Image (cartoon, helix red, strand yellow):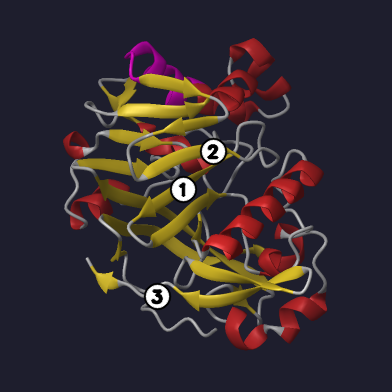
Amino acid sequence: MNDENPRNSSVQSIELGEVEVIRVVEWQAPFTPAHRLVPDSTPEIWQDNKEWLAPGHWDPDADKAVVALQSWVLRSGGRTVLVDTSVGNGRERPASPQFHQWQGDFLGRLAQAGVSPQDVDVVVNTHIHVDHVGWNTRELDGEWVPTFPNAQYLLPAADDFHYGPDHAYGDGRRVDDRLMYEDSIAPVHRSGQATLWDGTHRIDENLTLESAPGHTPGSSVLRLASGGDRAVFVGDLLHSPVQILRPEWSSCFCLDPAQSAASRRRILERAAAERELVVPAHFGGAGAVEVRKDGEGFALGAWAAYDLA
């Protein structure tokens, strides 16, 4: 269960059937106290699994969960699909101090992976949160414009409604939600590049989006099936591997923890049955892992083995 993949490489790749999957890591570090990230978790579950949780997923000295800001580039059917777009630079996020006026090298990491903004054909936002939609846009002459000029942006309809003006920007609970929508979502609508979907959405012969609500109203997963290989990109359905061991535990960021737990168990049941590689948005370490049934619960299998891209 040990994660032996290089933690400091920002770009890694793996072949799944006829799809090339490139992991693009912008940042990885201890983020927040473990019990805060997964409020129902116990000190014992972290300590009992310390051997493999540390250092890629937990810093035991600080008792902080290690997370990554990362995106996934899928080269499928002759097209380039970008899954989630990180925080974005220079954003006003007063309620999220860790992301307020963030400055990172996201586009530089994409370039390292051989991807320019013009190359991206499809952008998938697994859900609409500040750390998944930021680079949907960039600032040009004082205005926010789509970063990927040739891309179709696939947005979950339920999230677009919840975080957009029709639902008062997330019920008006956080100023960041309005700011996020205005600088990262609305410009994509204005450009005519946004496609709203609900339920399921087929991207191509290898890739299908599926709703998995709870973390947000429109949270989704992206399924990959090519040849004999299977993977599921689960967004924020999982924040830490301890949630695989205890899928009833939701993160502190889930709007509906009970619904999130139900979606998580359903997705993990299918991943175990179909031997899908589970690819969460924020896992540190190798970032992706197989799961298997373990009685009424689940256990971790092999971590993803990458080549350097």
Give the SS element for disc 1: strand
Q: In the image shown, does 234 or 19 lie closer to the viewer?
A: 19
CB atoms of marks 2 and 1 within 8 Å:
yes
Give the SS element for disc 2: strand
Instruction: Locate residue 163, reporting x and y percent.
Output: 61, 23
N-term mark: 1 or 3:
3
Give the residue pinned by disc 1: 223
Give the SS element for disc 3: loop
Q: In the image shown, does 239 or 182 lie closer to the viewer?
A: 239
Q: In this view, does 14 lie above or below 182?
A: below
Q: Is residue 59 above or below residue 139?
A: below
Cα–Cα gap, marks 2 and 1? 8 Å
Is residue 59 left or right of 23 when viewed as pictured? Answer: right
- Residue 41 visible in the displayed image: yes
Numbered badge on residue 158: none
- Residue 238 visible in the displayed image: no
- Indicate whether residue 219 is drawn in magenta: no
Give the residue pinned by disc 3: 7
Residue range in magenta is 182-193
Which image quadrant for residue 246?
bottom right
Instruction: Locate residue 275, reporting x and y percent.
Output: 51, 65
Give the residue pinned by disc 2: 210
